[in-house]
Amino acid sequence: MILKTLETMGPLHGYGIARRLEQISGDMMKLNQGTVYPALLRLEQRGWIGSKWGTSDNNRRAKYYSITRTGQKQLTAETENWERLTGMMARLLRATEES
Amino acid sequence: MAWLRQFFARIRGMFSSAPRDAQLNEEVREHLALAEQEHVRRGMSQDEARHAARRDFGGIEQVKEIYRDRRGLPMLENLLQDIRFGVRTLRKNPGYTTVAVLTLALGIGATVSIFSVVNALLLRPLPFPDSDRMVILQESVPKVIPGKFPVSALDIPDFQHFNHSLESMAAFSFKPMDLSGNGFAEGVDATRASAALFRILGVEPALGRTFTDSENNFGNNVVILGYALWQRRFGGDPEIIGRTVLLDREPYSVIGVMPAGFEFPPKGLPYSRPAQLWVPIAFNSAELDPSDRGDNFNFSVLAKLKPGVSLAAANADVMAAATQIQEQMYPVEFRDRSKLALEASVTPLVDLIVGNSKRMLFLLLGAVGLLFLIACANVANLALSRGSDRRREIAVRVALGAGRLRLVRQLLAESGLLGLAGGFLGLFAAYAGVKGLVAIAATVLPRAREVSVDATVVFFAVGISIFSGILFGIIPAFAASKTDLNETLKEGGRSGAGSRGHRRMCDAFVVAQLALALLLVTGSGLLIRSFVRARETSPGFSTKNTIGLVIALPNSQYSQAQQAYAFFARLRADASALPGVASVGFSSDPPMNSNWTHTFVVQGTKSRRATARLSIFTRSWKEVIFRRSAFRWCAAGSSPKRNHSAKATWSLLVMEWHGVTGPAKTPSGAT
């Protein structure tokens, strides 16, 4: 989800990512915003996202995260995987209903 | 790939943690500031906004904790921390540390020393290329003579013809010779070798060349010198090639010098001795006499298996070849396999060399293994009693929230450190020990020169050190971590003597230690005792005031038996005339050292065939050594009497022989 966010929104700082995730999920996902940081760290360790220090809207130093090329590839793969899985589940459920 | 990248990122994360912490702090601060701003924009008061931002973020310290754990490798960080702490604790207890390290060093040092011998003899390949394919071909005649022995000269080319599993074969045979010509005459251990030998071994001479195939034939007087002999007798003369030396009073031309460290036949190989020089195999007419077939198994055969041929297949193949040789090549009267069956087998060269030392080595390894265990038990006991002193320290740490596993890990890190320190010291001890060991055992131990402390040994030492740390550390660590928090803290400063369970464990260690020590002492005591017994056992003759001398008469001047007889007669007369000499006798071999096996059946009995090692000696021999002899009956008459022989165990028969020209009477059936 973080990858998708970064792909659509471009480079973003941690707060931005956390807010965006909240917006997308609505109230379905009520997570502590802080949990985004360990997740970001893990993605960065895997080389799927990169980070750079920049200046935030209120002129303070902030760390901006952006997706890398490996991250793009990973996102594509995961998306396909997810779609395949959901497609399969959808068909399965439909078939069950019909019978 | 991703996990690998992650792993390296985490290793990087272990270092420079302070600036990274600062960065995280800054990031979190910025996060909170932004959130606060947004809340304010939506109409909250500054205070409310700050609280809301914090609430949304969740536990800041928790996040930081998770973040930090994920950044580095907490396992490794903890280990490093444990080790640092262990070093501090050990340094605070120099007495305990010294005793433990020295004890472990002793145990590990001894084990590593013996292991380096095992490593050199049994684990490392021989110092020849493709040595794993080198085998010794041996013949046997199981119905007549027990054991395996070298090969008859005429069978060698036949084996070459009939086998399908050997790539190449080379013959060699021990021959004592006398070397003279420049300076004093001396006896040397020579080896007759065919040209193929050096090709199979894959060694190049340091100087000159090795034999050519045409030099295998009789009459080519060329010699290759061993490095040591070349250095000692010829001063390492680089111009030695082409010079002539006298061997058995015949001129031989030096064609090569082998490199330093080259030893063949290797020490320990049966029926041979490490050569000081090599001469061509040059079978003489007597050795190639067809009537000698199936007898005079005098030539060792080194062979190289074809690549990919298993030992079992090669054995089956040479066995079939032996059958073919007997049935097709032997004189007609020897072809009946129901009476006498020629068999053959191949044995890896390395097995034959170290075969005799193997049991001794494993015995030694077992003994030092026991010593190692005793050392571990000893240190474990120390650690255990120290554990009861440390109960308060541990109780405090439990109270502060240290988990039991964490405590055990910490204590194990400490014992591991001790083990490694002991191992380090032990390795040095082993380094010195190996040198001493080699110096003592060089004359009896095959491959002694190759024994050294190499990478494998160091690896073994490190492994055994860590193992020892865990071995002696685990029980005390668990015992210490079981500390009852309430009881210990309530004792309030009193250092109690430890619980009953604790003491029972200490006792168990002492008992184990004592049992192991007893085993070791008993074992070594028995060994020493059997050694002493072996020394004290009377061989049936007295060696007191007796000196022996091995004489090899050169064939060139003593080809006729009469010449040899005349020589020995004169020697006896001259030696007897020496003041202080009581009597002089001659025999074919030093007592109990005969390699000459004969089979016989005693006349008038229908008993099975028996074999005996045979020595031949002159009548005066008995005056020299058979003074109080179990074998007096044998020396007294000219041939053993039947009723006496029946009492003998058939393991040793000594016959008297008049002179050196031929036996006076041959027991019937002798072959």
Image (tube, rainbow, N blue to C red):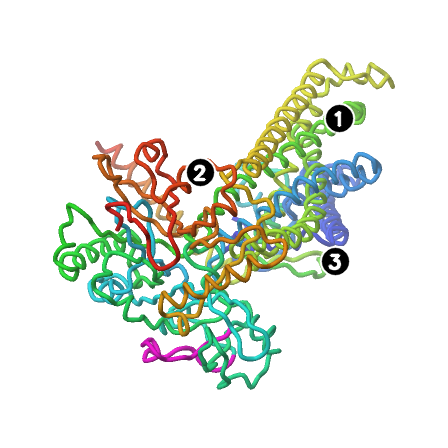
Q: Return the residue at label 3.
A: A61
Q: Is residue A60 visible?
A: yes
Relative image position of residue A68 (x, y in whole percent): 54, 61
Amino acid tagged 3: Arg
Q: Return the residue at label 2.
A: B632
Q: Residues within 10 Å of mark 1 (few under 14, many from 20)?
A: many
Q: Are marks 1 and 3 on the same chain?
A: no
Q: Return the residue at label 1.
A: B387
Spatial CA span between label 2 and label 1: 71 Å
Read off the chain for label 1: B
Q: Which residues are magenta?
A: B207-225
Left or right position of B308 against B124: left
Spatial CA span between label 3 and label 2: 110 Å
Q: Is residue A79 visible?
A: no
Amino acid tagged 2: Arg
**Magenta segment includes B582:** no
